[in-house]
Image: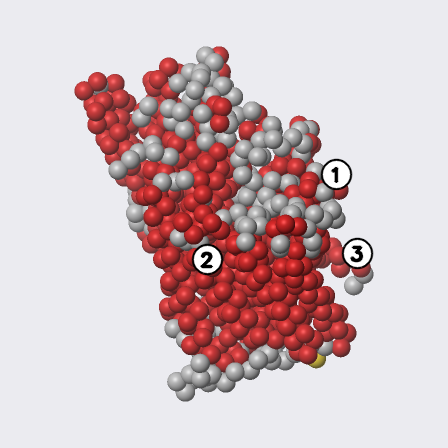
Amino acid sequence: MTHAEATHRTSTGLDSRKIGMWTFIGSECLLFGSLISTYLVYHGKSVAGPTTREILNIPLTSISTFVLLMSSLAMVLALAAVTRGDTLWTRVWLATTAALGSVFLGFQVYEFTAFVHEGLTLQVNLFGSTFFVLTGTHGAHVAVGVLWLLSLLVRSFQGKLGPEKALNVELAGLYWHFVDVVWIVIFTVVYLLQ
Amino acid sequence: MSEQPQHHEQAHPGVGTYLTVAGVLTVITLVEVGAFYVPAFQGWLAPVLLTLSATKFVLVVGFFMHLKTDHHLFRVIFAAPLLIAVAVAVALLFLFGVVAL
Amino acid sequence: MRLRSRIWSWVTTTDHKRIGILYGVSAFAFFLVGGLEALIMRLQLASSDNSVVSAETFNELFTMHGTTMVFLAVMPLSAAFFNFVVPLQIGARDVAFPRLNAFSYWVFLLGGLFMNVSFLVGAAPNTGWFGYANLTSSQFSPGLHVDFWAIGLQVLGIASIAAGINFIVTIVNLRAPGMRLMRMPVFTWMTLVTQFIVVTAFPVITAALVFLMFDRTFGTNFYVVAAGGDVLLWQHLFWLFGHPEVYILILPAMGIVSEVIPTFSRKPLFGYAVVVYSGLLIAILGWGVWAHHMFQVGLGPIADSVFAATTMLIAIPTGVKIFNWIATMWGGKLNFTTAMLFSVGFIAMFIIGGLSGVMHSSPPADLQQTDTYFVVAHFHYVLVGGSVLGLFSGIYYWWPKVFGRLLSESIGKWHFWLTMIGANLTFFPMHFVGLLGMPRRVYTYDVALGLDTLNLVVTIGAFAMALGTLVFVGNVCWTWRKGEAATANPWDAAMLEWAIPSPPPVYNFSVIPTVKSRLPLWSEDGYEPKPLPEDPPGPIHLPDGSYWPPVTAVGIIVAATGLLTGSLWVALAGIGMLVVGIYAWALEPFEV
């Protein structure tokens, strides 16, 4: 058996890293499932402090939700570009995705700061505890995703992100889209279903 | 490393599809936010919003994450934990009396 | 090789066989620590109103005994077998992500040490292995006790999830040609099922522990009743993880038994497909029974009925497996080696533990039994009688493959009988002790309870088991010096790991075999398997070691220490190390 055969053959014909990424995403479903369940279980059980209706800013969050949705579009376009070997547009779309992700994070920082000023803190009531831990965990995931995308961008500028490395972009994309769908759920459950 | 471009090309839809999906996602989001502000909807806001949100979820996972066209193994690996998570969430909502039969 | 470079080669190793040995050695050391904790508790309880240890120390002992045995002994001992055996059984050269595998091991080891350092600073965890809220709140548990426990478990969770992903991918993607899913050895199957449970169950405890840590560190309200919080949230989340966790502990042992019994009965496993599907069914049903740990909190008649029914239901696939093992032995050419004795012991003990489990699936019965030694008896029958006997069976079975020498059978029989008699002497009287009203987790009891004699018997049994374990250590030492050299297939077993020399060469298989049946080394339907060539026909590429996995693992433990001590700088240093480790790992050339 040659070296190439020994290293390239897999039972399913799929790349191990992609299966690993999907398994990780499956695992993350349970993490966010637990966080969202806790938020719902405690919904309306706060005994003090601001409540959802008084504090959540729907227009603002609708915009940040839209930003994150569009970042997902930029992400798939980056994957399409790298797959066809289009270096310029790979960079453009990767940078766009990272930028939109950063904008989303900016909205979140603004939102958190505003909430604290209006009296909603981690400690003040159950809503504060569950809300900040749930959306904060999601925000941390977005932040990791932005770092990942920027790392890919650097690799692209180093000339090390050709079409043969498209899988690296695809893996980052899977993570990114997953973080996006988690937000789709959070936006509905936390913001719209008050 | 084991790059297999032939898989990618089969599995991934084109730019046009992506743009269409993004458009649909935007429209659904607008409808969601709109429904939130219409007083007449308040009675059945929950089922409508959950359905719309689930639709968005399926669109992103199906098209942007390519689960619709990709190898069925990925669907299994993703769907099994997702179903457990949903079942657990529903069970907890019953156990804590948030929803009742 | 010089000693320093030899140690270095073990630290940087990415070879699944070496990592398996590291897991085994470390887990056995923790097993001894956990056993020692149990012995001290049994000394304290040997007679009424005893004062070997204080109530405070007793709390630390039962907490760390449980935590150690579950997370630092049984799980990583199973991991030792996953690592060493699974790639060999599926005909692979290594796991899918060798460096991630090394990372898992180092995170586990450092996490285990982290938790045990608590003894040295006089702040060992003391709120029970399930750490019920709000006993764990800052108000009722000041000091670092609970922090050591919560942060330690988070760290161990990282190791488990990383290993879980790795083994799922390995089993799904690195099987030899022809090894279809329904041709995989049952041990490999049970590993796959176990890892599926790991990657789904551990995130739930991660979330629950995040809430706990936020409550303790930042003053959030997750488990604060005064703020409207519900302490039952912790119980639900803990047991949502905790019940699948018991299947994480038992399914690998069931896999081992499913390899050992056919080998020493000279018969294929009876009802292979049914055994596999039962394992899958256990994993799925295991998600729907958690609240049977909580009957005493008063869930209401509907929840009680549902969880009682699902709990009784899960006895069916479990019972099916037991019948399959017995049917495998039926009419077989039985050879009672030490490995076989441990497996048969497993079946007997697991039936007893399973039956008492069905007893407290009924809420009214459970209300009498919960929090008494009856429950302690039940879960030790399944964990010691089940998991530990199964793991010892695996140790005797695969030892020759791992080290190239056969463990002494005559010393092994002593080990088995001392363990078997000791375990029954320890755990059987606990049923009576419990039904007669002795509560768990209490450091002493009154002479008027009349339980002195039974408790003394239990203590004697515990020391008999300890003696058995010492005999095993003696067996290892004896075998190391004088053990009989093992051939490639000393048991004449059927699976692929026995097709290669003992111990296996670093590349495992000279040529990746092609699999044509479930029992590749046993001739079936006139098919005679061809032996593999002694030497590989060409050079085989193997990955070099890497020191980034241990560096990354150290980064995690430094960050955990910063979190524990509340030192931002230490935490940032740890995170910095983690980030450097991850980038260096991602960028270093490493061909798998």
Report the Cα–Cα distance between label 3 and label 2. 51 Å
Name the kind of residue labelled 1 in the image: Val
Q: The residue marked by circle 2 belongs to what chain?
A: C
Q: Nearer the viewer, residue C484 or C526?
A: C484
Q: Residue at x 50, y 61 (%)?
A: C353
- Compared to residue C456, the image places residue C577 above or below, namely above
Query: Which badge, 3 or 2, comes first in the chain's sequence?
Result: 3
> In the image, C489: left or right of C225?
right
Residue at the outermost bottom position: C526
Query: Which badge, 1 or 2, comes first in the chain's sequence?
Result: 1
Q: The residue marked by circle 1 belongs to what chain?
A: C
Name the kind of residue labelled 3 in the image: Arg
Helix or strand or loop: what does disc 1 sit on?
loop
> In the image, C576: left or right of A141?
right
Name the kind of residue labelled 2 in the image: Gly
Query: Which badge, 1 or 3, comes first in the chain's sequence?
Result: 3
- Compared to residue C507, the image places residue A136 above or below, namely above
The image's mark for residue C357 is 2
Q: Nearer the viewer, residue C144 or C142?
A: C142
Q: Which residue is mark 1?
A: C121
The image's mark for residue C4 is 3
Q: How far across and how far down the image is residue A30, in percent?
A: 43, 42
